[in-house]
Image: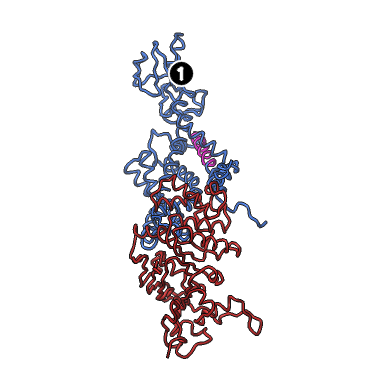
Chain colours: A blue, B red
Amino acid sequence: MKTNKSNINSLFRNRWFKFKRHKRGYYSLIIILVFYVLSFLLPLLVNKDPLIVKYNNNYYFPVFKYYPSITFNVISNGEANYRKLKQSLNEKNTDDFILMPLYHYGPNENLLEELSVMPPTSPTSQNWFGTDDRGRDVFARVLYGFNVSVSFGLIVTLFSFMLGTLAGALSGFYGGKTDMFFQRAVEIWSALPFLYVIIILSSIITPGFSLLAFILILLSWVGITLYVRGEVLREKAKEYVFAAYVSGSSKYKIIVKHILPNSISPIITFAPFAVVGNIALLVALDFLGFGLQPPTASWGQLIQQGMSYPGLDRWRLIIIPLAFQFITLILIVFIGEGIRDAFDSKQYSRLK
Amino acid sequence: MKKLLQILNLKTYFFTTDEETNKEIILMAVDGVSLDVYENEILGIVGESGSGKTVTAQSVMQLIPEPTGKIMNGEILYKGEDILKKQGEELRKIRGKEIAYIFQETYTSLNPVLTIEEQIVEVITTHLDKSFEEAKQISVELLDSMGIKDAKERIKDYPHQFSGGMRQRLALAMALAANPSLLIADEPTTMLDVTIQKQIMDLLLSIKKSKQLTSIIFITHNLSLVAQYCDRVAVMYGGKIVEVSPVNELMKAPLHPYTKGLLYASAFIKDKNNKVYTIPGNIPSLKEVIQGCKFCDRCTEAIEKCFKDEPELFEIKPDHFVRCHLYTNE
C-alpha cells in the first residue's frame, strides 16, 4: 500500500491521472494509438499479396517474400495476380487455398487491367472508395497515407523538439555571450522563408520520406528553443539549482537532472499541436507537389488529383483524404487539449 | 584554537547600470571583509538586509553570478588552501564534501520533480565511494537522525509532501550527506515559526556534536538565536564587519554604536514615549559613496572624525574587534 502511495504522488503520475480524467483527450489518445499501431500491420490487413498460399502441397508466404508468377503456373510480369489465382484455385476444387488479407488491394497496385472504365472509377464493392487516376485503390492508399502522415508528424516533431530543447537549454543555461550568439542565430534562421526554402530544395533534389523529414527538422527546431530557453532561464535561478551546485554536482548533471525535467512542461504541451502542424504541412507540400514523391501513398497527392479534374467531377478524391486528415488532426488536437489541461496547475481557482 | 576558514580582505562587487541616470555603477556588496572561523565553533553573522552577510557566504562557495558580480580581491583559506583559486573538478570536491550550504527558502531549495531519496543519494554518490544501495541505506539513516519519522517510507516522497520545517530538515540532510566539516546556514530559520526555529537550531547543535561537522556559520537577523546558540558573533554593516566578539561579551557590553542599536531594537526596550527603540535612518544604498564611517549619519555618538576618516577594525580586547573611532586612543 505504502509504496503505491508514493508512486501516485509523482508529478507525472499526477498529470497522467489528470489527463485520464479528461475523457475526450484520453479516448482520442487510445483511438490514435490503436489505429497507429494497426497501421504498421497494414501489409497484413490491406494488401494484394496473400498471407498464405497452399499450392501443390507447398506453402508460400507472398506477404513476406517475392515469388515469380511461374511458381504458381501463371504467366504474367513479375508477381502473379493472387486475386485471380484464388478464383481459379476455388474453381479447381483441390486442397490448395489462398488466405488473403481482409482487404484485397494494395496501395501501389495498378488495377488498369481489371477496370472496365477509365480510372478514376467510382466506389464498388471491391474498391470501397474507388480508384485514383492511375487505377490504384483509394481505400488502401488513404490508410497507408495515415501511417505515413502520422509517422512523419511524430518524427519531425520529436527530432525538431530534441534539437530545439538542446539549443534552448544550452542558450539559457550558459547565458551571456553563448545566449547572445544562439539567439541571433535563431533569429536569422527563423527569418528564412520556410516554404520557399522547401520548394527550392525539393525541386532540386526530389526528397524521399527521410530527406523531407530532415529538411523540415532543420527548418522547424527554432520555434521551441525560445520556450525552453525561457524556462531554463527561470529555473536556473531557483534555489534547488544552487543547492545542486553547492552539493558539488557537475554542470551536465545540473542541466540534465535538475533543470530540464523542470522545464519540460511547455515542450510536452506543445508537442501534439506541433504534430498537427507537421501533418498539415506534409499534406500541403504533397498537394503542391513538393513533398513526398509518388508512388508513396499520400493524402496531399490524392487531393491534388481530385482538384485537377474540371468542375470538381471527382470530388470524392478530395473529400475522402480530407476527411481522414480532419479526423486524425482533430483527435490529436483533443489529445493536446487533454495534455494542456493536465499540465495546467491552475485548473481550479479558489476565487469564483 | 585552529582556524578552519580564513576570509582575508574579501571584496565582492556587483556591476549594474543605474536605472535613473543610466550610468554604470559599482555596488560594493562586500568591501574588505576579514573573518576567521575556528574549529568547533558556531559563528553568527548578523546585520540588516543588504549588509553583505549572504554575499560573503556566497563568495565562500563561489556562487556569485558572473558577470554581474565578481570577487575582486581577497583570499579564502580553507584548511590553509585558497579555495577561491579552485575551479571545476577541484571546486566541486570542496562544495558539499568539505563545505555545505543551506538556504533560507525552504520551498524551493529541493528539486520538485525528484524524490528525496534521489536527491540525497545523488550527493552521496557524487562525493563518497558508495554503491547505490549503500547510499540508499545511508540516506535513510541520515533522515532518521534529522528526526523524520518513518524515514524508510517518507524518503520516497516528493518535496511538496513535506511541511516547511520538515523541508529544512531535508535540506540539512542533503547538505550533510557527504559529511562536510563546515556548514554555512544562510538564514535557515527566517521562514519558519518560532517553535520550529528552536527545533531546527537544536537539531543543528546535536548534529554538530554527533557528526564530523566541526563548525557552523550561522547567518541571521535574529539576535536572540545568536545569543542562545553561537560562540562568537560578527556584526556586519554596509559590506564591512563592524564588530567581532565572543557572544557573551557582545551581549553584555556591545561597543560599536550600531551593535548597541541592534541590541536595543531587538530587546524591545521602550523609550520615554513608549515606543520601541529603532536605529534612526535607513541602511545606506550601496550606490552611495560615503566618506568616513559608513554608519556616521545614523550614529548617535558620532564625532567629527567619523565624517572624515574610515575607522579600521582593531582588537580592543583579546578576541574582541571593533571598527569605531570612539575607541581609538588619541
Who's the residue at 65% across and 56% down the image? A350
Question: What percent of the width, then of the height, locates residue B215?
Answer: 45, 64
What secondary structure is found at the residue carrying circle 1? strand
How many marks overall?
A: 1
Image quadrant containing the C terminus of chain B? bottom left
> Any magenta on residue A330?
yes
Q: Residue furthest left?
A: A204
Q: Quadrant of residue B167?
A: bottom right
Give A43 or A231, whichever is nearer the viewer. Answer: A231
- In the visual, does B204 lie left or right of A74? right
- In the visual, does A135 lie left or right of B193? left
Residue A1 seen in render: yes
Question: What percent of the width, then of the height, locates residue A342?
Answer: 56, 47
* Chain letter for the residue marked with disc 1 in the picture: A
Residue A230 seen in render: no
Instruction: Judge whether B125 appears above or below B222 on screen.
Output: above
Give A72 or B153, whichever is nearer the viewer. Answer: B153
Prevailing SS of the magenta stretch: helix
Image quadrant containing the N terminus of chain B? bottom left
Instruction: Judge whether A280 appears above or below B269 on screen.
Output: above
> Any magenta on residue A171?
no
Q: Quadrant of residue B311?
A: bottom left
In magenta, the rendered stretch is A313-331
What is the three-letter code of the residue carrying label 1? Leu
Question: What percent of the width, then of the height, locates residue A181?
Answer: 36, 60
Who's the residue at 47% across and 91% down the image? B304
Residue with the mark numbered 1: A99
Residue count near mark 1 (Cα–Cα under 10 Å), binned few <14, some 14–19, many ≥20: some
Instruction: Judge whether B264 appears above or below A56 on screen.
Output: below
Who's the residue at 60% across and 65% down the image? B194
Q: Residue furthest right?
A: A352
Question: What percent of the width, then of the height, locates residue A285?
Answer: 42, 43
